[in-house]
Amino acid sequence: MKAKHILATLALSALSLGANAQETLKIGGIGPLSGGGTAWGLAVQRGVQMAIDEVNAQGGLKVGGKTYKPELLMYDDKYSATGGRTAAERLVNYDKVKFIVGPIGTPSVMAAVPIVNQGRVIMLSNGYAPDILKQNGKDGYNFRTMNSNVEFGPAMVKWLKENRPEARKVALIVPNDATGQVVMPTLGQAYRNAGYSVWSEGYERGSKEFTPLLMRMMAQDADVLDLNLNAPGEAGLLVKQARQIGYKGIIWQVGGPGIDEVADIAGPLAEGFMSYDVFDFNEPAARKFVENYKKRWSGVINAQTPGWYNSARILFKAIEEAGTVSDTDKVRKAMESISGFDAGIYGPVVWGGERAYGVNHQLLNKFWITEIKNGKPHALTSLFPVKE
């Protein structure tokens, strides 16, 4: 009897352990962890990791009667198309992931989209090219979880017109890559529609010396220098060098949030610089996020970090709602249907994009215009894209 009792106890213990056992759920991550876009890559990595830490601290994801422990597999795309394609191929074909957060930047995202669509892998990315969402249309597996310049550009240009009425001519300095090719038609047209004249010139990604280009810009008598989607490292150098050679006009950035990094690079010369921003760290709701971040990392928190945290939280919610970690068609449908879910960062989820891209895979988030004042960023105003 005693032996039977022991065997029964062991059996019950085994059942209990089986019921509570957690399976690992691999979450792919792609972003630039080297070069001028490093701040954005760290934002992807750290934002997703914060969401993973949070859900694991709560016992994991409960999906279809099982419990899963998310684990991040992060790859450096070097902010390039080649890197984005290589990272996506490795995650999809070698690591066999079903879910990817990132990359950021048009070249990398454009290279990754065909791979994830073919592999039926859900990807939550951030690149501005319209074709990112137009590829495969409603059959695509890619979601853009931050606003593109199609969403925030016209609103920011309108704000500039109303609040800086003396400005008449805008200079756009853009990289000579897919990003620049996307920025110029959309953002340039937004300025022209508002009555501005526009001058533009490109540069090679990774450049460090911008003085000759900036001298040509000054010869055009531009009232506004718009740094659009330049990576934080390059944007900071452009601000610093423009002020060093005596440019007195408005410098702002309609895209490419990284105002803290720009201020760090340009120092006192960043005073008055304004930028599109995706988060206001001074809002009361941001305090908990900042506290959790500081428990793990020090230094500047890139403003995109909360956006990637938000993206991962939305993904986890969709997985739980779908009740599966393998059927990505069900997860995609759940993702499209979780309007109203609030991860505590930007408010309830709102999807748009049908008119612009043919599919409602564009997350519409509140955004800010932030200015460097007395050496620190201060939010001037918050805006929201108009839902179609």
Image (cartoon, rainbow, N blue to C red):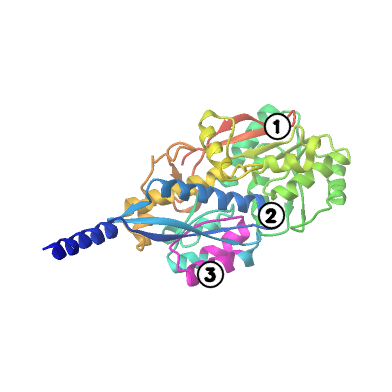
Residue tagged by mark 1?
376
Query: In which image quadrant can residue 340 be found?
Result: top left
User: Could you say whether the residue bearing mark 3 is in a helix, strand or loop?
Assistant: helix
In the rendered view, would you say 362 is above or below 375? below
Residue tagged by mark 2?
180
Q: Is 223 positioned to the left or the right of 338 in the image?
A: right
Q: Residue 183: within the magenta?
A: no
Q: Magenta part mainly helix, strand or loop?
A: helix
Q: Is 79 positioned to the left or the right of 292 in the image?
A: right
Q: Nearer the viewer, mark 1 or mark 3?
A: 1
Query: In which image quadrant can residue 291 be found?
Result: top right
Q: Could you give the CA–CA distance between mark 2 and mark 3, rounded to whole angstroms?
A: 25 Å
User: Where residue 287 appears, x then y in whole percent?
Assistant: 54, 32
**Residue type, mark 2 in image:** Gly
**Residue type, mark 1 in image:** Lys
User: Where residue 275 appears, x then y in whole percent?
Assistant: 67, 38
User: Could you say whether the residue bearing mark 1 is in a helix, strand or loop?
Assistant: strand
Tell me which segment is drawn in magenta.
84-113
User: Where residue 373 appears, x then y in whole percent?
Assistant: 72, 29
